[in-house]
Amino acid sequence: MSPSGAPFLGPIGITEYLVVSVWMLECGLYCVFTSRNAVALLMGVELILNAAALNFVSFARFGVGRVEGQVSAIFVIALGAAEAAVALAIVLALFRLTASVRADEASRLRG
């Protein structure tokens, strides 16, 4: 027991990190495959990228102890930020043209 009376569950290992990462990946894939809203689609892509970053960091933490995982995670975060900026600009252009953010209507942007 811990001093607060709660049971001590032990240290968090790589399995717990991987379970959270798989859960994030599943939520992101579900969001990408089922949403018609462009903003929800972008949130799904961000969840997938964050799941990959969590994998990089967890394998670096429990692996050899090198920093490649953290560096890769920083690149994934930078990629996600750039993707979000470009995609939100496209969503704003879509909204100006169609007055909705449905991803089905994105083909109207061709021109």
Image (cartoon, rainbow, N blue to C red):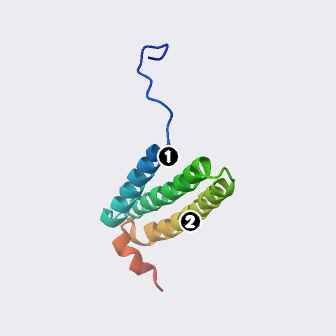
Quarter where residue 104 is shown: bottom left
Give the residue at mark 1.
Answer: 14
Element class at badge 1: helix
Please tell me the numbered disc located at residue 83. 2
> Where in the figure is residue 110, as x and y percent of width and height?
46, 84
The kind of residue tagged 2 is Glu
Q: Residue furthest left?
A: 34
| Number of callouts | 2
Report the front residue among 65 and 90. 65
Identified at 63% across, 56% down, the residue is 69
Q: Check disc 2: other Cα within 10 Å, few if <14, some if 14-19, many if 20+.
A: some
Q: Is residue 72 above or below residue 65?
A: below
Please state if 21 lies on the left or on the right of 81 as rendered.
left
State how far apart marks 2 and 1 are (Cα): 29 Å
Closest to the observer, 107 or 100: 107
Residue 37 vs residue 43, the one in the foreground: 43
Please tell me in which quadrant of the rendered image residue 16 appears: top left
Badge 1 density bin: few <14, some 14–19, many ≥20, Cα 10 Å: some
Q: Amino acid at mark 1?
A: Ile
Image coordinates of residue 12 in percent, x first then y, are 49, 37
Which mark is first along the chain, 1 or 2?
Answer: 1
Q: Closer to us: mark 2 or mark 1?
A: 1
Q: Residue at x 59, y 51 (%)?
A: 57
Q: Whole-percent x and y of residue 64?
A: 64, 52
